Every structure is written in C-alpha cells, then in structure tokens.
C-alpha cells in the first residue's frame, strides 16, 4: 500500500477583487413631512416637546436609468422631554424604520431605512451556471488497483468567478441564503466553509465516496473520473451601504434540489468523449433533466458540454497509449508526491499487490500560482444585466485557481493499492505519483 501525501493549501472558491462599483449615488430624496408638537398652547419661546419627520415616496434609480419606487413610510421622533422635566422622555430619537420593502414594480430590489431618513437599497439576483466541475480523479495504474483518499483530507476545487463580469465589482463571500441556510454540508459528501473575506472552501472528505479503481492494465486515462455539479447557482447581492456579496448554492429551480441538495454525478473520460456508453439509467436521467437556468447537458462530440468537461482533465486525449503517458507534468500545476518509485512489473504466476508507505512532504517556502478558465452557458436574473454585466452574453467563466505558500497549507493523503500486471505485460515498469494542485487528487505517469 502506498500512502500519498502533500502539504497543500485550503481549497478556496474565491471572487475576484475589483474597484468598488457603488449604488449609493442613485437615490432621489424622499418626501419629508414634519409635525411639531409643543407641551401647551403657549410656546413662550420654548422648544417643542417633540418633532416627527415622516419619510415617504422612496425612489431609487438603477444604473440603467430605471426608477424603482417603494411603498411605506418611515419616521423619526425627536423628544425634548428633558426641557419640560419629563423623565421618561429619553434623549435619543424613536425611529420607525422600513426593512426589506420590495420595489413596487416587482423587481428584486429591496429598500431598508436607517434612522428613518437614510435609504439603503439591496439588489438581489442569481446566475445559474449549467454545471461546475468539482474534481478530476485520475485512475490508479493496474487492473484491480485502487486509490483511496484518506478521510478528512478532502479533495475539491479552487475557483473564482470574477472573470465572468465586464464591469468592476468587489465581492464578499457568504454561505447560505434566506431560502436555504447551510450548516457546512451541501449534500452528497460535499461541504463548504468561509475561508476568508472573499473566499469559500469547498471539499469532499466523505469516506463513503473516497475509493476509486481501474479495470485495465497500466495507466488508462479513459478511466479518469470527473465529478460534475449539475445544479449550482450563484446568488449575488448588491447594497448601497455595503460591499456586494456572492453565495454558491443549489439551483432552486431544480426539482431534485430538496432531495439531494448539490446534485453531483461522475462520468469517466471515455464516457464524456464517446469512447464508452453511458448505460446507467440514473445517469441518463440526470443528464436529460431540464430546469430553469440549467438544461440537459450536450454531448458527446466536439464543442459540447461533455467535451468541455473532459478538457478539465489535461490528459483526456491520451487514453492508454504507453508512449504518450510517459511525461513530466506541468510543474506549475502538479507537484511530485513524496512516494517511492512504484514498480509495475509482472510478479510471476500470481498478480500480487505491492505496498508503499510515505509521509506528507512540506510545502516549499515560496509561493506559486496556477489558474485555468473554462466558460459554461448560464442564465441570469434580469436585474443583473445592468448591475453585474456578464463579459459574454449567457455565459459565465469559472477560473480554477491554485495558490501555494508555506504559511497556508494542509495535508491531503491517499493510499494506493497496486495490482501487478500479468506476465504478458510489455509496457513501462516505473510509475510516479503527482499531486494535481487544482483538485487535490493524484496523477500517475510512467517514468522514462
């Protein structure tokens, strides 16, 4: 058994940081009606007992020039009871505020007031990407071999969404929403946490989902598995008084949402590329589902969803070719795991498993980064066509990102159980393991 490990950063799902894009300048001054009340009929130069300011006719103009009106009245009542010896009249004003009043036109624009006369607008909407690639699981070498990711180590994705927008917007990360508050778990073994002000960590550390196998001799990238989130949603909120925020959640229009939460399915590269059939009735049903903002995935074939998903595995085109699988992976993305060279040689009449043990290695004391983009079709709520303008119409961009340094790292691990090849094996006999720093999984290659 070979225990693979590497010092690695927390998996972050981050929003790009840009210059601030403010809504605060878009208010029309509300109508203010003032009522003054004195303690008695003879004022005698005395100040009023209290003054009430009522604010109504709230209006806000969005960046497209559309005026949104809000019903309701807020008020501020100022007491001067101390002048009249009224002990119960405190020095602070009594405020009646409005909260979460929706615009009269039914758009997802909400008004709240602060201290009666200060309006705060909050605009809400969602982007519904068709899918999100969560991980690439590389097949272990050998027919019957397995790779088992250690419970608690976690694998997942590191992504940004900032490249999706053409205008400058500064986003703060949040978890959960009013319709579906999350307590860490998002379903099917996946969970997310706030990593820092702008970042979300999403990982899978479920013991039930951690073992993966191979059914051919040698290294066969046809059997690499790609895990796909079929019903993601990005909820965005923009406020005139605070920074805009984003939340990664599940598509509420998916009829399966209430049952499984995050709907994550797995396909092999061979299935995505049309080299092997998809004959599982459950999978067939999942890919044919249609819901608002999603829709059936297309493929296999060039320029289809399946082809785009398969390309997130950098070795999707290699298959089982011996010569093509002898290479040194891109050092910007892959790190050589601290594991002895794996000897993949015939073992006589009995194909025995071989055992290897290693310790996690430390992250080097410098920073390196790697990122990759892929675009998916998406639908958006109408409010965001002006507030969050997509760079490409009806598409958003996921940017998978890896940033490593010596002060933000955690260990991942896996055990590798290798089944030796048969005596007829004529392929390479040395194998090395690398960590894919984008997805936190292990890649296997033949050594020259």
Image: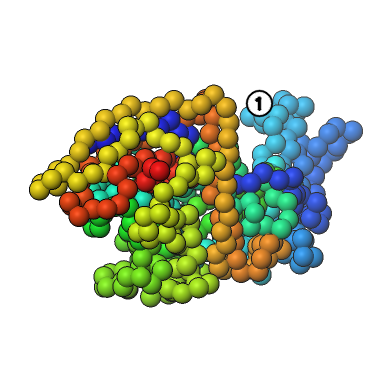
The residue closer to the viewer here, 233 or 365, is 365
Q: Residue at horizontal 20%, vertical 55%? A: 424
Whether residue 44 appears in this view of the structure is yes
- What secondary structure is found at the residue carrying circle 1? loop
Q: Quadrant of residue 110?
A: bottom right
Judged left or right of residue 131, residue 34 is: right
Toward the right, the furthest residue is 45
The residue closer to the viewer here, 20 or 108, is 20
State the image coordinates of residue 21 (x, y, percent, origin top left): 74, 50
| Above or below 39: residue 444 | below
Mark 1 crowdedness (10 Å alpha carbons): few <14, some 14-19, many ≥20: few
| Above or below 382: residue 73 | above
Judged left or right of residue 418, residue 182 is: right
Judged left or right of residue 8, residue 379 is: right
State the image coordinates of residue 308 (x, y, percent, origin top left): 50, 65
Whether residue 155 appears in this view of the structure is no
Q: Residue at horizontal 69%, vertical 50%? A: 169
State the image coordinates of residue 309 (x, y, percent, origin top left): 46, 62
The residue closer to the viewer here, 422 or 125, is 422
Q: Dot 1 corresponds to which residue?
A: 87
Q: Residue at horizontal 67%, vertical 57%? A: 165
Q: Residue at horizontal 50%, vertical 52%? A: 248
State the image coordinates of residue 148 (x, y, percent, origin top left): 27, 43
**Color style of the picture:** rainbow
Q: Quadrant of residue 412?
A: top left
| Above or below 274: residue 31 | above
């Amino acid at each position: 058994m070979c225990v693979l490990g590497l010092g690695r950063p927390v998996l972050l799902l981050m929003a790009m940081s840009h210059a601030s894009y403010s809504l605060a300048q878009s208010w029309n001054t509300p109508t203010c009606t003032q009522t003054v009340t004195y303690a008695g009929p003879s004022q005698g130069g005395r100040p009023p007992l209290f003054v009430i300011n009522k604010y109504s006719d709230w209006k806000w103009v969005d960046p497209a020039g559309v005026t949104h009106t809000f019903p309701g009245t807020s008020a501020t009542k100022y007491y001067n009871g101390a002048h009249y010896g009224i002990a119960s009249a405190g020095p602070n004003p009594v405020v009646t505020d409005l909260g979460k009043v929706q615009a009269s036109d039914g758009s997802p624009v909400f008004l709240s007031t602060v201290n009666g006369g200060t309006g705060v607008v909050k605009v809400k909407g969602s982007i519904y990407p068709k899918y999100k690639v969560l991980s690439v699981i590389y097949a272990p070498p050998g027919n019957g071999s397995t790779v088992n990711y250690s419970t608690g180590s976690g694998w997942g994705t590191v992504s940004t969404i900032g490249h999706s927008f053409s205008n400058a917007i500064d986003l703060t990360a949040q978890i959960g929403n009013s319709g579906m508050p999350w307590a860490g778990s998002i379903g099917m073994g996946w969970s997310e946490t706030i990593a820092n002000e702008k970042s979300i960590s999403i990982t899978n550390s479920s013991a039930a989902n951690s073992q993966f196998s191979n059914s051919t001799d040698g290294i066969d990238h046809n059997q690499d598995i790609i895990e796909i989130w079929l019903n993601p949603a990005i909820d965005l909120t923009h406020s005139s008084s605070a920074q805009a925020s984003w939340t990664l959640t599940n598509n509420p229009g998916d009829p399966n949402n209430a049952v499984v939460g995050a709907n994550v399915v797995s396909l092999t590269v061979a299935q995505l590329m049309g080299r092997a059939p998809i004959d599982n009735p459950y999978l067939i049903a999942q890919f044919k589902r249609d819901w608002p903002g999603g829709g059936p995935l297309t493929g296999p074939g060039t320029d289809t969803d399946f082809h785009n998903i398969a390309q997130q595995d950098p070795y999707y085109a290699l298959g089982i070719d011996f010569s093509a699988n002898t290479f040194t992976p891109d050092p910007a993305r892959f790190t050589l795991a601290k594991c002895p060279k794996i000897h993949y040689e015939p073992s006589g009449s009995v194909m025995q498993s071989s055992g290897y043990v290693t310790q996690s290695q430390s992250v080097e004391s410098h920073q390196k980064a790697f990122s990759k983009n892929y675009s998916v079709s998406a639908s958006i709520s109408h409010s965001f066509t002006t507030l969050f303008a997509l760079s490409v119409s009806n598409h958003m961009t996921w940017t998978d990102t890896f940033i490593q340094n010596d002060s933000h790292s955690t260990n991942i691990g896996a055990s590798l159980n290798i089944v030796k090849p048969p005596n007829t094996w004529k392929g390479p006999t040395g194998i090395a393991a690398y960590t894919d720093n984008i997805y936190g999984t292990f890649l296997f290659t033949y050594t020259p």
